[in-house]
């Protein structure tokens, strides 16, 4: 007869204290070990711009920035981020002044239904932070983890390329082909 598995110690199931800086504001939180960053942001911090799409890390709707790098927040346990700086779509604008990516998305009609847009913009911001995609083809490749059911991909890439060009970081496709 198999041995009975003892119940988990209560300490493992108890909420854990963590500190996160969310959109520039330090937050001391008590979080159960199974709570994802996505659920913490949406359900406890009322930051509903971050969307729950597939809840399996396959669509990118939940993309946020952790210490400037893009992650799928549905796959990350909040307790594993103690001390981290989190930026959501709500934290990109500076008061009423939109982030250049937010403005470019508007200028290029880089959304239709808008559900994926917060994740697309956060992913694009991370892409700019990584400074690894100066060509249109590289932007397309490195944004491929963010799905858009409406098919606004061309406009999304146009918006990102505009920001890259404004920053002087874009390379023309012909220069890329010459390499």
Image (spheres, grey):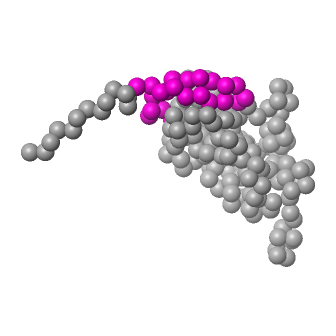
Give, as a single range, the part of the protein colored magenta.
14-37
Q: For residue 106, which quarter of the picture?
A: top right
Q: Position of residue 4 (x, y in %)?
A: 17, 38
Image vertical order of residue 30 relative to residue 72, above or below? above
Q: Residue furthest bottom?
A: 178
Q: Position of residue 89 (x, y in %)?
A: 71, 34
Image vertical order of residue 11 relative to residue 61, above or below? above
Q: Is residue 56 visible?
A: yes
| Quarter of the picture holding the C terminus | bottom right
Nearer to us in this view, 174 or 109: 174
Q: Is residue 90 found inside the magenta-colored segment of the image?
A: no
| Quarter of the picture holding the N terminus | top left
Horizontal placement of 90 versus 5: left or right?
A: right
Q: Is residue 21 found inside the magenta-colored segment of the image?
A: yes
Q: For residue 141, which quarter of the picture?
A: bottom right
Residue placed at 89% from the left, 50% from the top? 167
Q: Position of residue 61 (x, y in %)?
A: 61, 42
Q: For residue 7, which quarter of the picture?
A: top left
Horizontal placement of 125 versus 66: left or right?
A: right
Q: Report the number of discs.
A: 0
Q: Position of residue 76 (x, y in %)?
A: 53, 41
Residue placed at 55% from the left, 28% from the top? 18
Nearer to us in this view, 125 or 31: 31
Residue placed at 72% from the left, 47% from the top? 126
Q: Is residue 155 visible?
A: no
């Amino acid at each position: 007869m198999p041995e009975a598995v003892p119940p988990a110690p209560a300490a493992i199931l108890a909420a854990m204290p963590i500190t996160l800086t969310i959109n520039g504001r330090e937050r001391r939180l008590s979080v159960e070990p199974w709570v994802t960053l996505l659920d913490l942001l949406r359900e406890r911090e009322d930051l509903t711009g971050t969307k729950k799409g597939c809840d399996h890390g396959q669509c990118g709707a939940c993309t946020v920035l952790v210490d400037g790098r893009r992650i799928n927040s549905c796959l990350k346990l909040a307790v594993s981020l103690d001390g981290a700086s989190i930026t959501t779509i709500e934290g990109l604008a500076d008061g009423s002044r939109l982030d250049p990516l937010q403005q470019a998305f508007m200028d290029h009609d880089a959304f239709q239904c808008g559900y994926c847009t917060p994740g697309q913009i956060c992913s694009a911001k991370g892409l700019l932070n990584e400074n690894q995609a100066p060509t249109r083809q590289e932007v397309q490749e490195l944004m491929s983890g963010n799905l858009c059911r409406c098919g606004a991909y061309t406009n999304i890439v146009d918006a990102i390329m505009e920001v890259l060009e404004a920053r002087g970081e874009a390379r023309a496709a012909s220069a890329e082909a010459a390499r």
